[in-house]
Image: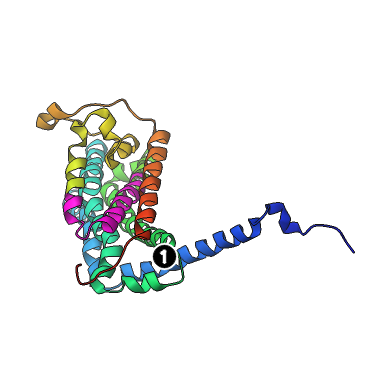
């Protein structure tokens, strides 16, 4: 009789069972995400998100039809303003508000959340799947909008097309897409957590909007609690601070890009950990929601 130990004992006591549970959880997360993606993208309720994501592209296209000449410098500043002020401050914020809050509170309104709670899976897996699906939806929508705006901005005049194909312009596009992705993850995690804490997360979301709006005037240590603090160092073009708003802006030391990315990822991880903890004790009561 052979005395060789089974090969899976190298995993240690219970190692094989833990690996199996991990694989099962991962499959469940993916399954939940697939169901949520189908639910998020179907129906007329997604049209306002498409409009929000691609509205700048329509405006830029209308401008391009009447102006075949342009300045690369001016168009670059306009595009930077669109990304920084329209997408980051408005479109992505409210888009993620609708997508991520709807992933939980939408099911409460439709009286279907209890079916998910009755499924044979941990609630943390449910939160992870919902977050993954909502993040994919928002990144595809707003990333597509930013890419379309970038293309329309430089495609209507020869100097712009030449710049768009250069290495510098492609670095700008990569930075904008990275910022868009991180903004969707950051705002999404916050709104998902708010939807698990408050029956009506709209008022707390307005508070978050005000906080993000005044983040430039906050002390440096409070800036770390805002999503935009981590996004600004990643923007390839810095917009000048002029006029009345410049009087109240506190300039912090530039944050290295790697630290900004890792800081926001850590922020998202902490918020998601809170959401996973919160959903464990969540009770559904349709009569009060």
The reply, left or right, for residue 69 in relation to residue 118 is left
Front residue (pair 18, 140): 18
Indicate whether 282 appears above or below 247: below
Mark 1 element type: helix
Q: Quadrant of the N terminus?
A: bottom right
The reply, left or right, for residue 28 in relation to residue 38 is right
Residue 72 picture location, percent across and down: 26, 39
- Is residue 148 visible to us here? no
Front residue (pair 148, 120): 120
Indicate whether 180 appears above or below 215: below
> Is 180 colored magenta in this rendering?
yes
**In the image, what residue occupies the spot 56% across and 62% down?**
21
**In the image, what residue occupies the spot 21% across and 36% down?**
215
| Magenta span of residues | 179-206
**In the image, what residue occupies the spot 39% across and 38% down?**
263
- The image's colouring method is rainbow
Q: Residue furthest right?
A: 1
Residue 193 picture location, percent across and down: 30, 53
Residue 206 picture location, percent across and down: 17, 50
Question: Which quarter of the figure has residue 128?
Answer: bottom left
Question: Which quarter of the figure has residue 115?
Answer: bottom left
> Is 169 colored magenta in this rendering?
no
**In the image, what residue occupies the spot 33% across and 47% down?**
186
Residue 38 picture location, percent across and down: 36, 71
Does the magenta stretch mainly form a helix, a strand or a loop? helix
- Crowd class of label 1 (few under 14; some 14 to 19; many from 20; radius 10 Å): many
- Is residue 212 visible to us here? yes
Question: Which quarter of the figure has residue 35?
Answer: bottom left
Front residue (pair 154, 115): 115
Residue at the spot of label 1: 33
């Amino acid at each position: 009789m052979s005395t060789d130990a089974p090969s899976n004992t190298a995993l240690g006591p219970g190692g094989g069972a833990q690996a199996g549970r991990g694989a099962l959880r991962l499959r469940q997360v993916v399954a939940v995400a697939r169901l949520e993606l189908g639910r998020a993208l179907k129906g007329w309720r997604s049209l306002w998100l498409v409009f929000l994501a691609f509205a700048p592209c329509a405006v830029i296209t209308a401008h391009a039809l009447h102006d075949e000449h342009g300045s690369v410098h001016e168009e670059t500043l306009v595009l930077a303003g669109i990304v920084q002020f329209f997408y980051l401050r408005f479109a992505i914020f409210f888009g993620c508000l609708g997508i991520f809050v709807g992933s939980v509170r939408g099911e409460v309104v439709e009286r279907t959340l209890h079916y998910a709670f009755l499924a044979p899976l941990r609630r943390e897996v449910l939160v992870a799947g919902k977050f993954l699906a909502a993040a994919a939806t928002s990144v595809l929508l707003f990333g597509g909008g930013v890419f379309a705006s970038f293309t329309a901005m430089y495609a209507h005049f020869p100097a712009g097309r030449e710049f768009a194909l250069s290495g510098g312009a492609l670095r700008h596009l990569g930075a904008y897409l990275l910022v868009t992705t991180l903004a969707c993850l950051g705002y999404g995690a916050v709104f998902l957590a708010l939807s698990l804490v408050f029956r009506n997360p709209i008022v707390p979301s307005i508070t978050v909007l005000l906080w993000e709006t005044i983040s430039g005037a906050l002390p440096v240590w409070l800036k770390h609690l805002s999503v935009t603090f981590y996004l600004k160092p990643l923007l390839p073009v810095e917009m000048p601070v002029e006029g009345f708003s410049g009087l109240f802006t506190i300039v912090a030391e530039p944050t290295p890009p790697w630290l900004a990315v890792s800081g926001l990822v850590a922020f998202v991880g902490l918020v998601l950990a809170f959401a996973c903890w919160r959903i464990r004790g969540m009770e559904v009561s349709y009569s009060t929601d």
